[in-house]
Image (tube, rainbow, N blue to C red):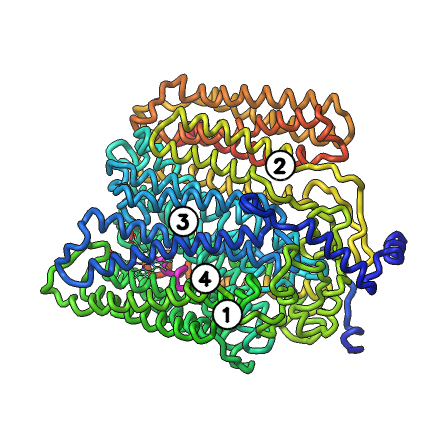
């Protein structure tokens, strides 16, 4: 009991990682997805079905780069928290303090970065292999 | 200092007489009205039960339709149903299952159990729940009833034009208007549930201690706000085409049927997850209880549920793989469809891990939970298959799809839901359901389901298309179909056992002891059967499973040693807390029984039903009545000035009785509603640019646009109105009443002028909305924005009146806070509309 009390960090209520921060990474995924889809849809509609996909592939590449860079920034800022639970030293975060809540939300946000990164790479993949609009 | 005082002078919870008096006051305040007034109840425990029973009623009805389908298909060349009747039957089957059962049952269950899970007594807006329920009931009866007049929709549950826009009769209108009406109920429930989870958790329940069900409800509520509104926008365009011949989906006049498919599936795919997640949420409550240990990986569930919620918005085109979109588009959506399997899988693995780490107790809810996982995994696997575009080209529109969709729906929704009903039945009624009947029901349902739907994979592979009313006998489909039909009836028998067990008179049934499943979560602290007041006291939460972790919890709960153990003023009360750490910020007075919810729902029903028959005068009158009843509702039921500023809420704390602005629940409700509204608006904007994408030249050169002068004027006027409304809020807060009222009055005038200018654009240029999709979409945007501005004017006038009546003062300023918030959204709408219709033609 006592050693976790020593570890107890004081944190003001309401302060730290909040829900907006948690959904930042998936929001980056959503924007990336929309940019890719809209760019491809408009380009292929306007340029015709036999058109070379190169411009779209460039846009997708750039968007992917920016999105991953954004994710990396979020990831690094959350990595600093990197706290295990202040109560049990695990990923369960069952303690009842603002600090624990902050660590919990940071962990969720961090893992969402990873998931969003994977989903972004998935979305970029078709642009890697396709060459014409068809 | 003050807290200590209140503590010392607080009631003495050691004294049984004092406690008995508290309980008497509580039950008086929360008493369910008797006799026919029962139907004026708004408390979650009544409305929740009505909601569940009604949704299951529609489910049974749709299930009978399913059996009719299977009867017709049992043998080749059957003449049991005619082709036309068959079309109505399968359309109504799909429609009712999805819109009248699968989605509403989420709202129903959540309304019923969420307050208990959060240890509170009611949701923040009980009247809104009741209103939503009445909308649902009336709309559902209207839609289902149509089949008895041979007037049911018959174009399939996703109503693809041009078939459905060219069809005569009123079937498609019934579908559209009935469902729009029910979407209103869904959005109302979303508002209620999101605010409930964010702002009404018990003190101490930091967001990492929230029951997983709460997380799922929050996520699904958020998804509803982004998924349903595009369909509302689509419905709006669709009905304008059917009623007034505005050619949004008619290719001959510049429209495009694919626009509908996009709008429908931007809604339709997330909807699948809106159905699935809340049912899985029930498993997240059931599994730990019967494994006898906390969930293994709380944070993993939260993050993967969030991830699923997001990714599910990137899948919609997988329903349109066969429409000839460029393959790169298919690629994006195929990839996302595969990606979503990751977070979905994590959730399933967490359940399995929890079961493996614990010692599983055998029980009926657990049986259904395991059956659900088995079925869902199978459905998920075929899902991964059809997400691969080339495979889908083959399987599209075949019975393979019918098999896939029922596997996901039964495994992801129906079985978990039945597990949840078995699990929470004692909490709702105080009785246990029969274990013996439960086991029978399970095996009949499980076997029947698989006998019915497993062969359909093969039937589909052999080439049988879906939505055919019969088939010739020489294609090798006969046996498979007959087996499916037998399975359907076995399933139905099992389901009837379940329904019988739930409804049978309970004189011989086993009474539930308290916490019958030995669960750890807070809802099981309730006494069974629960009193009308719900929670004896609003607990202070320190862990996820208080009943397991804290042995004095139940005693302190029963002795009312936490918050609000009393109803001193005879009022229904609940606590509002802060979002992240659940610190008490307000003691909220919750509304009691009323008829106004039913009356408003009836008036609104008039609008939708009369519009179906194109009786415009009656529609207009109903609209006016709806407006009056809403204003009456708000005027009499909200913004009350409490008799004192704050009160002791127990545990030595005091909380204010009145707050406004972003800390108050009303502000959040407005914010959430307007987010949904904004999404619908973006759906319309999407329509405009969709047309631009598919046309060589858009706006078409030979059709006059609204010009830029009138739109510019409209934009400036409406934004001026916004600035003044915002200023009015500040002036009111500063106590400058004259300036406040002048500003509001000027805002009203500017807004009215703005509406005029907005309409003048297309009017002055003689844009004919029936001629081409371009004028039609411009008019649609103008109509939307104008109607919203008109609503904004009514709100400004409401504030003005409230100010003169002394209801709206610098101290009690909720109304103007919320109206100013509305106008933030309004300003954006006006800005975007005028920019698009006035500005875009200049640059394209
Ligand atoms: C008694 C159990 C059920 C049976 C026997 C059954 C049977 C069927 C059959 C045979 C079809 C295909 C009709 C056709 O394509 O011609 C179908 C379609 C459908 N079913 Fe079910 N079903 C049952 C339960 C459910 C449930 C619980 C849901 C959803 C919650 C559901 C949702 C749907 C949907 C959305 C369609 C597509 C309708 C359309 O094509 O427009 N069904 N059902
Ligand atoms: Cu889908």
Which of B187 and B771 lies nearest the eye of the viewer?
B187
Q: Does B351 appear above or below B752?
A: below
Q: How many marks?
A: 4
Identify the residue under disc 1: B508
Q: Tell me the chain of label 4.
A: B
Whether residues under marks 2 and 3 lie with C-beta atoms below 8 angstroms apart, the answer is no
Identify the residue under disc 4: B503
N-term mark: 1 or 4: 4
Whether residues under marks 4 and 3 lie with C-beta atoms below 8 angstroms apart, the answer is no
Q: Residues within 10 Å of mark 3 (few under 14, many from 20)?
A: many
Q: Give the CA distance from mark 2 to mark 4.
A: 46 Å
Q: Give the CA distance from mark 2 to mark 3.
A: 27 Å
Which of B146 and B325 lies nearest the eye of the viewer?
B146
Give the farthest residue toward the top: B764
Identify the residue under disc 3: B266
Query: Residue B651 location in percent, x, y?
Result: 80, 59
Q: Residues within 10 Å of mark 1 (few under 14, many from 20)?
A: few
N-term mark: 4 or 3: 3
Q: Quadrant of the N terminus of chain B?
A: bottom right
The magenta segment: B331-340
- Residue, x 68% and y 44% (percent of image)? B664
Query: Residue B538 location in percent, x, y?
Result: 71, 58
Residue B335 counted in the magenta span: yes
- Give the quarter of the image for residue B457: bottom left
- Residue, x 54% and y 65% (percent of image)? B424
Element under disc 3: helix
Q: Give the CA distance from mark 3 to mark 1.
A: 49 Å
Which of A82 and B811 lies nearest the eye of the viewer?
B811
Q: Give the CA distance from mark 1 to mark 4.
A: 13 Å
Identify the residue under disc 2: B821
């Amino acid at each position: 009991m006592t050693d976790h009390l020593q570890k107890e960090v004081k944190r003001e209520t309401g302060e730290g990682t909040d829900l907006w921060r948690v959904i930042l990474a998936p929001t980056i995924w959503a924007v990336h997805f929309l940019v890719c889809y809209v760019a491809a849809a408009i380009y292929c509609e306007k340029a015709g079905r036999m058109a070379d996909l190169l411009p779209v592939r460039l846009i997708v590449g750039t968007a992917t780069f920016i999105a991953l860079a954004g994710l990396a920034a979020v990831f690094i800022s959350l990595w600093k928290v990197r706290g295990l639970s202040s109560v049990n030293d695990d990923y369960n975060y069952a303690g009842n303090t603002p600090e624990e809540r902050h660590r919990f939300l940071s962990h969720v946000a961090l893992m969402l970065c990873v998931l969003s990164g994977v989903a972004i790479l998935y979305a970029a993949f078709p642009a890697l292999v396709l060459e014409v609009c068809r | 200092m003050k807290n200590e005082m209140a503590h010392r002078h607080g009631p003495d919870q050691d004294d049984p007489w004092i406690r008995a008096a508290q309980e008497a006051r509580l039950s008086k305040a929360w008493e369910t009205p008797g006799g026919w007034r029962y139907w004026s109840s708004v408390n979650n425990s009544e409305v929740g039960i009505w909601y569940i029973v009604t949704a299951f009623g529609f489910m049974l009805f749709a299930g009978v339709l399913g059996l009719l389908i299977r009867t017709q298909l049992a043998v080749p060349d059957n003449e049991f149903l005619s082709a036309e009747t068959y079309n109505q039957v399968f359309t109504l089957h799909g429609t009712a299952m999805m819109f009248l059962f699968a989605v509403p049952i989420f709202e129903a269950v959540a309304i019923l159990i969420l307050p208990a899970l959060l240890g509170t007594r009611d949701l923040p807006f009980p009247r809104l729940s009741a209103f939503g329920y009445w909308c649902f009931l009336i709309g559902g009866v209207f839609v289902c009833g149509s089949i008895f007049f041979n007037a049911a929709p018959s174009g399939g549950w996703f109503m693809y034009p041009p078939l459905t826009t060219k069809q005569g009769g009123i079937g498609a209108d019934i579908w559209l208007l009935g469902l729009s009406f029910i979407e209103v109920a869904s959005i109302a429930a979303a508002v209620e549930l999101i605010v409930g989870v964010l702002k009404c958790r018990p003190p101490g329940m930091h967001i990492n201690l929230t029951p997983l069900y709460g997380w799922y409800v929050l996520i699904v509520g958020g998804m509803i706000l982004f998924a349903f509104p595009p369909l509302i926008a689509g419905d709006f365009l669709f009905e304008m085409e059917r009623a007034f011949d505005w050619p949004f989906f008619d290719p001959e006049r510049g429209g495009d049927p694919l626009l509908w498919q996009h709008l429908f599936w931007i809604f339709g795919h997330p909807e699948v997850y809106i159905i699935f997640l809340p049912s899985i949420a029930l498993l997240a409550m059931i599994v730990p209880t019967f494994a006898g240990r906390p969930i293994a990986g709380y944070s993993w569930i939260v993050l993967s549920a969030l991830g699923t919620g997001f990714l599910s918005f990137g899948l919609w085109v997988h329903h349109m793989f066969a429409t000839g979109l460029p393959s790169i588009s298919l690629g994006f959506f195929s990839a996302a469809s595969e990606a979503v399997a990751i977070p979905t899988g994590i959730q399933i693995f967490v359940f399995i891990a929890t079961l493996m780490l614990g010692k599983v107790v055998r029980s009926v809810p657990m049986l259904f939970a395991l059956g659900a996982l088995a079925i869902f995994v199978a459905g998920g696997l075929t899902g991964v298959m059809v997400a691969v575009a080339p495979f889908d080209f083959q399987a599209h529109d075949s019975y393979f799809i019918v098999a896939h969709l029922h596997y996901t729906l039964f495994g992801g929704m129906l079985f978990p839901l039945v597990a949840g009903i078995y699990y929470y039945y004692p909490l709702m009624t105080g009785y246990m359901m029969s274990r013996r009947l439960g086991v029978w029901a399970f095996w009949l349902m499980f076997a029947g389901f698989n006998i019915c739907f497993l062969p359909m994979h093969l039937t589909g592979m052999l080439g049988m298309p879906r939505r055919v009313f019969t088939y010739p006998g020489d294609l090798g489909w006969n046996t498979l179909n007959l087996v499916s039909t037998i399975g359907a009836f076995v399933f139905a028998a099992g389901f009837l056992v379940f329904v019988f067990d739930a409804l049978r008179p309970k004189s011989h049934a086993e009474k539930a002891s308290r916490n019958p499943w030995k669960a750890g979560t807070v809802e099981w602290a309730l006494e069974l059967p629960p009193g009308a007041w719900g929670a004896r006291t609003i607990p202070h939460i320190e862990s996820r499973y208080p009943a397991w972790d804290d042995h004095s919890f139940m005693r302190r709960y029963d002795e009312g040693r936490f918050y609000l153990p009393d109803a001193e003023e005879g009022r229904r009360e609940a606590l509002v807390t802060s979002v992240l750490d659940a610190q008490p910020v307000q003691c909220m007075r919750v509304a009691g029984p009323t008829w106004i919810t039913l009356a408003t729902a009836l008036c609104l029903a008039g609008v939708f039903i009369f519009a179906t028959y194109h009786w415009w005068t009656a529609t207009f009158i109903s609209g006016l009545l709806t407006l009056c009843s809403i204003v009456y509702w708000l005027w009499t039921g909200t913004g009350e000035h409490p008799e004192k500023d704050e009160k002791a809420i127990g545990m030595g704390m005091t909380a204010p009785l009145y707050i406004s602005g972003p800390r108050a629940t009303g502000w959040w409700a407005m914010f959430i509603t307007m987010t949904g509204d904004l999404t619908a608006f973006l759906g319309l904007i999407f329509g405009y640019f969709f047309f631009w994408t598919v046309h060589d030249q858009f706006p078409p050169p030979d059709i006059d646009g609204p010009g830029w002068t009138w739109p510019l004027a409209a934009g400036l006027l409406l934004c001026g109105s916004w600035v003044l409304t915002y200023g009015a809020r500040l002036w009111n807060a500063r106590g400058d009443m004259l300036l406040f009222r002048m500003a509001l009055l000027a805002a009203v005038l500017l807004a009215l002028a703005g509406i005029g200018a907005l309409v003048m654009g297309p009017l002055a240029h003689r844009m004919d909305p029936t001629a081409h999709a371009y004028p039609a979409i411009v008019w649609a945007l103008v109509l939307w924005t104008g109607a919203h501005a008109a609503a904004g004017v009514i709100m400004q006038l409401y504030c003005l009146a409230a100010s003169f009546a002394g209801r709206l003062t610098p101290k009690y300023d909720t109304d103007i806070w919320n109206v100013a918030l509305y106008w933030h959204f309004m300003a954006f709408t006006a800005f975007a509309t005028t920019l698009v219709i006035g500005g875009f033609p200049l640059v394209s």
